[in-house]
Image (tube, rainbow, N blue to C red):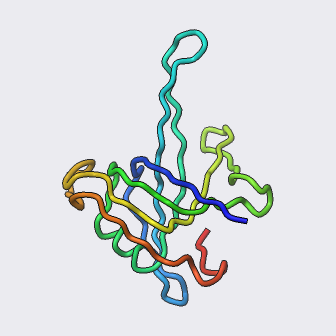
Amino acid sequence: MYNQIIIAGNLGKDPELRYTPTGQAVVNLNVATNEIFTDASGQRQERTIWWRVAVWGKQAEIVNQYLTRGQKVLVEGRMNADPQTGGPRIYTKQDGTAGASFEVTAQTIRFLSAKGEGSSAGGHGGVSDFESPPPSSLDDIPF
């Protein structure tokens, strides 16, 4: 079986780079996708879905170097199901309401923001593609 997901959205915070005990680089991203629609009563509605994205290897180091909060990215990868539920990871928010986290392992990251767009710290100019292989084992996944 095979699954692939494509997400285009904005980074909610700066990338978080870590290294596994074996020295493999992994960066975690929070990507927001927005949907704007008109409901049955004619009211404009907006829905935001948050995605947790893991990027591995050399691609993780490049993403960490060039991306910052607010920049636009396109992520191609596979969606990971919670082993206990088979769906998104369910958790309780600080305000006591239920939340869900959709988790993706990236295979390709494309930088969509123009240089300097989305952050005062600058950025990477143009659209760039970076691909990396997935982790060698599930033990290397940090979440």
Look at the image and tell me in which quarter the C terminus lies.
bottom right
**Residue sitting at 19 percent across and 55 percent down?**
115
* 65 and 40: which is toward the camera: 40
Q: Position of residue 120 (x, y in %)?
A: 20, 51
Rendered position, 85 above or below 92: below
Q: Is residue 6 left or right of residue 40?
A: left
Q: Residue furthest right?
A: 84
Considering every residue shown, the one lying at the far front of the view is 1
Residue found at the very far top of the displayed protein: 41
| 58 lies left or right of 50 | left
The image shows residue 133, relative to residue 2, as above or below, that is below
Question: Residue 40 lies in what quarter of the image?
Answer: top right
Q: Quadrant of the N terminus?
A: bottom right
Residue in view at x 56 percent, y 66 percent: 105
Q: Residue at x 57, y 60 (%)?
A: 104
Total numbered labels: 0
The x, y position of residue 126, in whole percent, is 23, 58
Quarter of the view holding residue 93: top right
Q: Is residue 28 left or right of residue 40?
A: left
For the residue pair 131 and 49, the one nearer the viewer reads as 131
Residue 61 placement (x, y as % from top left) = 37, 75
